[in-house]
Image (spheres, rainbow, N blue to C red):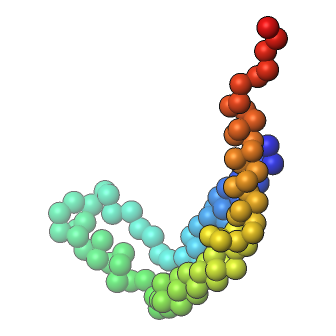
Amino acid sequence: DREGMILGVFTMVTNLGRAVTSAALVLGLGWAGLRTTICLEDEGVERDACEADKIHNQPESLTMYLQVMIGVMAPLIELVVCLLTWEFPIRPGSQMLDDICKKQTESYRSRTSPKATCH
């Protein structure tokens, strides 16, 4: 069942890409200088002040990192995905899609056709 194996490989590569990208982005936050604090021990006004400090006392490099990731990298990645989708060889009306459909139809018919019986 070659199609199933190909689908499994595509899924594996997709999930690996997501995991690597997520790891790189989270590590990038640390490299950009993200400062973390735990405000759970504080209550009331002190907790509000701690939360505000956590947001407003981040380095400029972190602000720049987030602006570049959201404003530049995300749109570029979306454009790459669009280009790869456009160039993918299986599309409506393509010979490759017709061949796959014919092969699947033949495979389905061979599994569902009644077997020859002896009388």
Residue 89, given in percent of the width and then of the height, sits at 73, 73
- Residue found at the very far front of the displayed protein: 119
Q: Residue at x 35, y 78 (%)?
A: 55
Q: Where is residue 39 shown, x and y percent of the image?
A: 33, 63
Q: Residue furthest left?
A: 44
Query: Does the rendering let one see residue 94?
Result: yes
Q: Is residue 16 above or below residue 108?
A: below
Report the side of 21 relative to 53 (left or right): right
State the residue at coordinates (75%, 69%).
95
* Residue situated furthest top in the rendering: 119
- Which residue is pictured at 71% across the width and 48% down the height? 104
Tell me the quarter of the image containing the N terminus. top right
Q: Nearer the viewer, residue 13 or 45?
A: 13
Task: Look at 71% across and 30% down and name the residue there.
Answer: 113
Where is residue 19 shown, x and y percent of the image? 63, 62
Tell me where residue 9 appears, x and y as whole percent.
75, 55
Q: Where's the C terminus, which quadrant?
A: top right
Could you say which quadrant of the image residue 51 lies in?
bottom left
> 53 left or right of 106?
left
For the question of whether residue 13 can be seen, the reply is no
Judge whether 106 appears above or below 86 on screen.
above
For this view, does 9 lie left or right of residue 15?
Answer: right
Q: Nearer the viewer, residue 36 or 68?
A: 68
- Tag count in the figure? 0
